[in-house]
Image: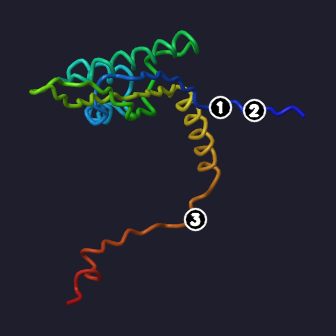
Amino acid sequence: MIKKRKKNLATEVYALSQQIRMSAHKARRVIDQIRGRSYEETLMILELMPYRACYPIFKLVYSAAANASHNMGLNEANLVISKAEVNEGTAVKRLKPRARGRSYLIKRPTCHITIVLKDISLYEEFEEYIMCSKKSELITKKKSKNLTCHDTYSSGGLWDKK
């Protein structure tokens, strides 16, 4: 039995960076600013933000766009960041020498960042098709009901109770 897969409407491309020497909390502060934005707007935001986490995220977004254009043949102008997540990695453990031959443990946090880009040109074509079909349905239907708008503030129904 051969299973046929339906063609996926969403064309998604991702890039993953692991073991970045940075706190996941500090990377999430930057990721929250770019989630849901277009590719070009994201690059401008990341260039102008003053945080250290911006550079690895900038490289990762740029790499995901390169994957989209090279592997899938997508246009970079139509890309939107659909999913961006930061996960905690393992803590790199180092020993700091202290007085009298003792040593203290230093934990340096790492994180894993995933960026998923989605091509929105397919969605725009699909929405145009839906809008055209809805307009044709609206033209065929006759307007049979007259809608009246009731203002709740001037009618006194809501605020008159004491």
Label of residue 87 in the image:
none
Residue extending furthest toward the front:
100
> Amino acid under label 2?
Arg
Task: Depth check: give the residue in front, 107 or 74.
Answer: 107
Q: Residue at x 40, y 28 (%)?
A: 112
Q: Residue 39: x percent and y percent?
A: 39, 22
Q: How packed is label 2: few (under 14 Cα within 10 Å), some, or many (20 or more)? A: few
Q: Is residue 9 left or right of residue 68?
A: right
Label 3 and label 2: CA atoms lie apart by 44 Å
Residue under numbered circle 1: 8
The reply to whether discs 3 and 1 touch (Cβ–Cβ < 8 Å) is no
Label of residue 5 in the image:
2
Q: Residue 31: x percent and y percent?
A: 32, 32
Q: How packed is label 1: few (under 14 Cα within 10 Å), some, or many (20 or more)? A: few
Please identify the quadrant where the N terminus is shown: top right
Q: How packed is label 3: few (under 14 Cα within 10 Å), some, or many (20 or more)? A: few
Q: Is residue 51 left or right of residue 43?
A: left
SS state under label 3: loop
Q: Residue at x 15, y 25 (%)?
A: 101
Residue extending furthest toward the top:
70
Q: Residue 79: x percent and y percent?
A: 45, 23
Label 1 and label 2: CA atoms lie apart by 8 Å
Of the image marks 3 and 2, the number of the one nearer the N terminus: 2
Residue under numbered circle 3: 144
Q: Residue at x 57, y 28 (%)?
A: 122
